[in-house]
Amino acid sequence: MTKWAIVGDIHSNLEALDSVIADAQRNGATKFACIGDLVGYGPDPNEVVERVIELGMVCVMGNHEHFVLGREGASLLHPVPALLVEWTKSELTESSRKYIESLAYVDSAHDFLLTHSSLSAPNKFHYCLYPEDVHREFFEKNGEANTKVMPYDGKLGFMGHTHEVAIYKASAYAEDQVRMVINPNELHLNTGWAYVVNIGAVGQPRDGEPKASYVIYDNIKRTVEFYRVPYDIQTTQAKMEAKGLPSQLIARLAKGI
Ligand SMILES: [Fe+2]
């Protein structure tokens, strides 16, 4: 049996990540996977990357890594994230940079898929909020080989990017319909359906609940369990203040927005 803890949108928040790791290990997780955005916004980019490496996390690239590596100009972002991209660039050690450079946009080496926000265009980072977004980014056949399309046979995909928990499901019997699963505590995966789970954010939740978010996938029971974990927000905020990071980023952590 393997219990996978799936984490993401850590955003250089070491206190949130360490609280999640401890909680996941208490809940029996022995492996970790990450949907990207290790860096950006928070004060500890290198420490977060080191922790991810230490735990041997399976990890894919988020938009913040993509921008920090200069694959697109940060001028495309809003001013505050753009500022944090530049700050993070100046903070990253060579080994952290090498690690994020090694990340792929999609990982399918296990019995689930990992991507930051899309299978069909994983380096474009479109937001998936509504079922039609998930249909477009995960299920729509676009005339190319179907390798970029999610199969329906009980397949499971994890994503993040919006920093809000959500579950979507689709079946081969109604190919154009992606449905949202409302308010689950535990998801049972049934054959004949495909599931896309947005795991929420470790380091900067935006659903009004400041606690760090992650899930545990049990590959024998075929369940996904959803967790929220308190962490020492004040320490993270004090570090951000000491490093001169923008006050709006400091304030939002306590509000979960
Ligand atoms: Fe993010």
Image: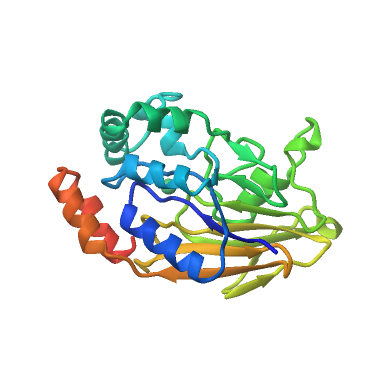
Q: In screen coordinates, is 223 left or right of 36?
A: right
Q: Is residue 87 above or below residue 218?
A: above
Q: Tell me the residue at 48%/28% (across/down).
A: 101
Q: Residue at x 54, y 69 (%)?
A: 226
Q: Position of residue 191 (x, y in %)?
A: 82, 63
Q: Nearer the viewer, residue 58 or 175?
A: 58
Q: In the rendering, at what x and y percent does residue 157 appear?
A: 66, 52
Image point (28%, 38%), residue name: 84
Question: On the picture, is 244 further left or further right than 257?
Answer: left
Q: Nearer the viewer, residue 244 or 48?
A: 48
Asked whether 120 or 156 is in front, the reply is 156
Residue name at image x 56 percent, y 63 percent: 29
The quadrant where residue 196 appears: bottom right
**63 w.r.t. 154: above or below:** above
In which quadrant is the C terminus drawn? bottom left
Q: Position of residue 194 (x, y in %)?
A: 75, 57
The image position of residue 74, as x and y in percent, is 36, 29
Colour convention of the picture: rainbow
Q: Nearer the viewer, residue 182 or 230?
A: 230
Q: How many numbered dots are placed on residues in this image? A: 0
Would residue 102 be found to the left or right of residue 68 on screen?
right
Q: Quadrant of residue 87?
A: top left
Q: Residue furthest right?
A: 173
Which quadrant of the rendered structure holds the N terminus?
bottom right
